């Protein structure tokens, strides 16, 4: 691709706190002023983001939607088409005897192909495959002159491919907006599409403004990022004279307790989800969700995701409880207007429920009053509480019964209601968060607790801190080395796999040893002058004879590099959540050189307390 196909494919990377929503709004409004008849599509990550953009952009020429809502509406146009249904049956290997009249999106993670259903993930996957099978369907995208996709780094690759392929070779401008620093783990955008994105024309602002943090914190963030192209200027209303603080300690937990006891409304950033849910007092609920097979590690959604995502959650039981707790609060507030609107619009409510007579209204008011009397008992089980709700005529009993009958929820239904009450309170007002919760809002006071992970999560924060003492880290330079080195090592590994087999049996190594050693030498020669390579790998490459075992155990191992790069992004993003005050807790026993480390952080505008 040359220059983003004449700049029709554009990438906008903006650091955390730099006002991406404002930037999208300004850009779209500018386009509308230039061409009031042009149609624009804006895809964003959450319903809250949709509402925010709709409040700022007042035009019938702009369609603003979450991805699932947009794709569902797109697919509805063809849901009864015979060719589409036949392809659906072929794709899911259904027999000709299976009758499907239309394709339906269940709005849940569950779907049964024999009923013509699609779930959260399969909706996106099938739509991409369908458009590849019938390319003429892409014409539906072509009514837009501009398409914006927000948070591209976390967007499902099927969707990015869908829009990329659907607009290729057209005058449509496709914008991907996000922050590459916030792509923490291998989720969302995959490495295949990353190579395509690398060819997009990057549209940079001359200046990035930070609308979240104080000037002192912004200065520290700039020094952590260490790249003049992404330097931010403070534009926030936060007026704080508190410098970021580094606390060196021999006991993280003791120091954390001392600091949190003297602070109010502190957001504590921890590494492990287990710590997060225990601190939120929903450990039992977390353990039960972890036991559900489809939320086990390696699946698209894990128990961590289910309990942390408050909007557009893929779990029906969580979504149902969020709705019922919201309803309960509205009843207590006597906010009957929103209650009636919710009953009409929500899938968990009975959409046929109507108030025709005065007596209907009296009965409805009495039912709501009884609910406020019966429901506050947190000693009830989850199942008992749901049964009380299910007695109400305005509830979709079929839907609630279906959820309660799922075997995966058997143990959860026996839990005390208090677990869901604490989950709801925590989701509304979190006081603790994981460092990698990159969608997190800003918080006045943030404490970043420096911890290493194991293999999951692969976060090597103290390797980062020790690297910082030897190398003047710049995000752009580190990222470039990271991607290029992994590409070279991946190529070497694939060469060995192709010849030696999936288990990489060493008995076949001898025949290819010379070629392997030549490739290793090429890698060494390519990176030998790179500071990151010198730190992580140079000593492993200085060798005359590379045995099969040595290559597998040393040359092909990249966990340390990956963990350090993950840690760098997590550290930056975690620090960027602070508005007024930032405190970083570090276990000094894990530092190779405490003096150098103190000097490094002092140069990044931190006050250093050494206890």
Image (cartoon, helix red, strand yellow):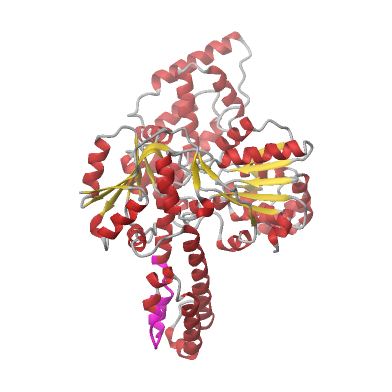
Location of residue 304 in the rendering, given as x and y in whole percent from the top left corner: 42, 47
Where residue 550 sits, quadrant-wise, is bottom left
- Which residue is drawn at the image coordinates 54% and 27% (left, top)? 395
Location of residue 583 in the rendering, given as x and y in whole percent from the top left corner: 32, 44
Assess whether residue 25 is covered by the magenta stretch. Answer: no
- Which residue is drawn at the image coordinates 62% and 30% (left, top)? 55
Residue 97 placement, left or right of 344: right
Location of residue 83 in the rendering, given as x and y in whole percent from the top left corner: 77, 53
Residue 47 visible within the image: yes
Where residue 53 sits, quadrant-wise, is top right
Location of residue 357 in the rendering, given as x and y in whole percent from the top left corner: 62, 10
Nearer-the-camera pick, 305 or 398: 305
Magenta span covers which residues?
A: 541-560
Q: Quadrant of the N terminus?
A: bottom right
Assess whether residue 557 is covered by the magenta stretch. Answer: yes
Vertical side of 481 occupied by 216: above or below: above
- Which residue is drawn at the image coordinates 71% and 48% (left, top)? 100
């Amino acid at each position: 691709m040359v220059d983003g196909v004449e700049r029709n494919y554009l990438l906008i990377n903006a650091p955390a706190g730099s006002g991406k929503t404002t930037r999208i709004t300004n850009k779209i409004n500018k386009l509308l002023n230039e061409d009031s008849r042009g149609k624009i599509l804006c895809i964003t990550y959450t319903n809250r983001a949709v509402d925010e953009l709709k409040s700022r952009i007042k035009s019938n020429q702009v369609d603003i939607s979450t991805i699932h809502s947009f794709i569902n509406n797109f697919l509805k146009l063809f849901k009864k088409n015979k060719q589409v249904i036949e392809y659906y049956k072929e794709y899911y290997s259904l027999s000709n005897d299976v009758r499907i009249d239309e394709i339906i999106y269940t709005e849940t993670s569950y779907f049964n192909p024999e009923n013509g259903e699609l779930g959260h993930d399969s909706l996106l996957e099938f739509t991409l495959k369908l458009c590849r099978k019938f390319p003429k369907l892409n014409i539906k995208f072509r009514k837009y002159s501009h398409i914006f996709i927000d948070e591209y780094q976390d967007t499902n690759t099927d969707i990015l491919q869908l829009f990329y392929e659907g607009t290729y070779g057209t005058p449509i401008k496709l914008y991907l907006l996000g922050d590459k620093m916030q792509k923490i783990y291998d989720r969302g955008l995959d490495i295949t599409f990353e190579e395509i994105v690398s060819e997009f024309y990057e549209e940079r602002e001359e200046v990035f403004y930070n609308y979240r943090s104080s000037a002192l914190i912004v200065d520290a963030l700039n020094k952590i990022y260490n790249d003049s192209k992404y330097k931010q200027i403070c534009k926030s209303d936060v007026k704080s004279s508190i410098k970021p603080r580094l606390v060196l300690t021999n006991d993280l937990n003791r120091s954390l307790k001392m600091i949190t006891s003297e602070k109010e409304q502190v957001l504590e950033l921890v590494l492990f989800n287990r710590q997060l849910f225990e601190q939120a007092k929903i450990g039992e609920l977390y353990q039960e969700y972890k036991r559900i097979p489809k939320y086990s590690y390696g699946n698209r959604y894990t128990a961590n995701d289910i309990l942390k995502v408050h909007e557009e959650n893929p779990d029906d039981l969580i979504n149902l409880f969020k709705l019922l707790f919201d309803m309960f609060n509205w009843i207590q507030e006597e906010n009957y207007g929103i209650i009636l609107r919710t009953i009409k619009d929500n899938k968990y409510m009975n959409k046929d429920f109507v108030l025709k007579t005065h007596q209907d209204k009296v009965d409805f008011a009495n039912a709501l009053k009884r609910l406020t009397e019966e429901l506050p008992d947190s000693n009830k089980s989850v199942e008992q509480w749901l049964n009380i709700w299910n007695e109400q005529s305005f509830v979709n009993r079929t839907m609630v019964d279906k959820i309660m009958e799922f075997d995966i929820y058997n143990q959860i239904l026996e839990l005390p209601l208090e677990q869901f009450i604490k989950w709801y309170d925590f989701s509304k007002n979190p006081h603790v968060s994981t460092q990698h919760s990159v969608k997190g809002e800003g918080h006045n006071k943030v404490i970043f607790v420096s911890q290493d992970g194991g293999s999951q999560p692969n976060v090597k924060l103290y390797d980062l801190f020790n690297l910082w003492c030897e190398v003047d880290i710049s995000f752009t330079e580190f990222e470039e080395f990271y991607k290029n080195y992994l590409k070279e090592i991946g190529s070497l590994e694939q060469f060995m796999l192709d010849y030696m087999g999936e288990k990489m049996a060493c008995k076949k190594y001898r025949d290819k040893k010379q070629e392997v050693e030549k490739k290793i030498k090429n890698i060494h020669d390519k990176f030998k002058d790179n500071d990151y390579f010198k730190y992580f790998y140079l000593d492993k490459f200085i060798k005359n004879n590379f045995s099969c075992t040595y290559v597998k155990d040393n040359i092909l191992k990249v966990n340390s590099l990956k963990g350090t790069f993950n840690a760098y992004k997590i550290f930056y993003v975690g620090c960027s959540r602070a508005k007024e005050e930032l405190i970083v807790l570090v276990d000094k026993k894990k530092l190779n050189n405490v003096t150098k480390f103190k000097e490094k952080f002092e140069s990044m505008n931190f006050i250093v307390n050494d206890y």
